[in-house]
Amino acid sequence: MRLKGKSAIVTGAGSGFGAGIARKFAAEGARVMVADINEAAARDVAAGIGGLAFRANVASGAEVRAMVEAAGAALGRIDILVNNAGVTHLPAPLEEVTEADFDRVFAVNCKAVYLTARAVVPMMKAQGAGAILNVASTAGLSPRPRLNWYNASKGWMITATKAMAVELAPAGIRVNAICPVAGETPLLKSFMGEDTPEMRAKFLATIPIGRFSTPEDMGNAACFLCSDEASMITGVALEVDGGRCI
């Protein structure tokens, strides 16, 4: 029960890594708001963990404010924020990615971190404590070809994590990131371009431990970094990648 008594918002928690993080947090005693743009998916996950479902587009300032206000009203306080919601563009030469796809990737992967911080940080400062976790990617550390702007968005997130950490540390707020390798999530097919045995084998060949990451892997890492056990850890980008970045 490492998170007993704590309240958390997890974005993009209707599926994939976000769902794994939400489930782990609840199992460790946290009260969790399951936020997702897919309301039905959020409700399904929330129902399974006794959490609170909320539909939100994290690229919208108004919807993020509404999400945080609802969480504050329902949970009383916000101890943990996990910025997990993310999107990618399909694999393509960098000059062929459309402006619309570029804007969508940076709105969800980058702007959302700013919007949630703007809404949550004042509450955490008033409490004198808080933990923010950004779900980045190995793509931000060791980029793959043909995912250029997705790679760049995750590199941005890692830099934002470190900048936030150094600024917010005096206020008692820790900010960290986890960097998953490709995992069994709805985004896997988009990363690969096509989900075939050959393409999976190609991706797996780059992961020394020999498997894709799982939502449970991310839940375990997130739980540690957001718990009091990690009270001396801030500004890290933890590779949860089976050795991919070695």
Image: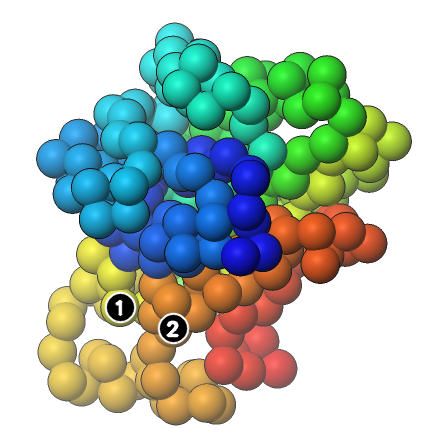
Is residue 101 visible to the viewer in this orientation of the structure?
A: no
Q: Is residue 123 left or right of residue 32?
A: right
Q: Residue at x 25, y 25 (%)?
A: 55
Hey, what amino acid is under mark 1? Answer: Glu
Q: Read off the residue under disc 1.
A: 184
Is residue 8 visible to the viewer in this orientation of the structure?
A: yes
Gap between marks 1 and 2, in whole Å?
7 Å
Colour treatment of the image: rainbow
Along the viewing direction, whichever of 228 and 201 lies nearer the viewer = 228
Determine the secondary structure under disc 1: loop
Furthest residue toward right:
170
Is 228 located above or below residue 182 in the figure?
Answer: above
Mark carried by residue 213? 2
Counting from the top left corner in percent of width and height, residue 82 is at 49, 41
Q: Residues within 10 Å of mark 1 (few under 14, many from 20)?
A: some
Along the viewing direction, whichever of 102 and 116 lies nearer the viewer = 116
Check whether the beta carbons of the residues at disc 1 and disc 2 lie within 8 A of each other.
Answer: yes
Counting from the top left corner in percent of width and height, residue 60 is at 37, 17
Is 127 located above or below residue 44 in the figure?
Answer: above
N-term-proximal mark, 1 vs 2: 1
Q: Quadrant of the C terminus?
A: bottom right
Q: Residue at x 71, y 58 (%)?
A: 229
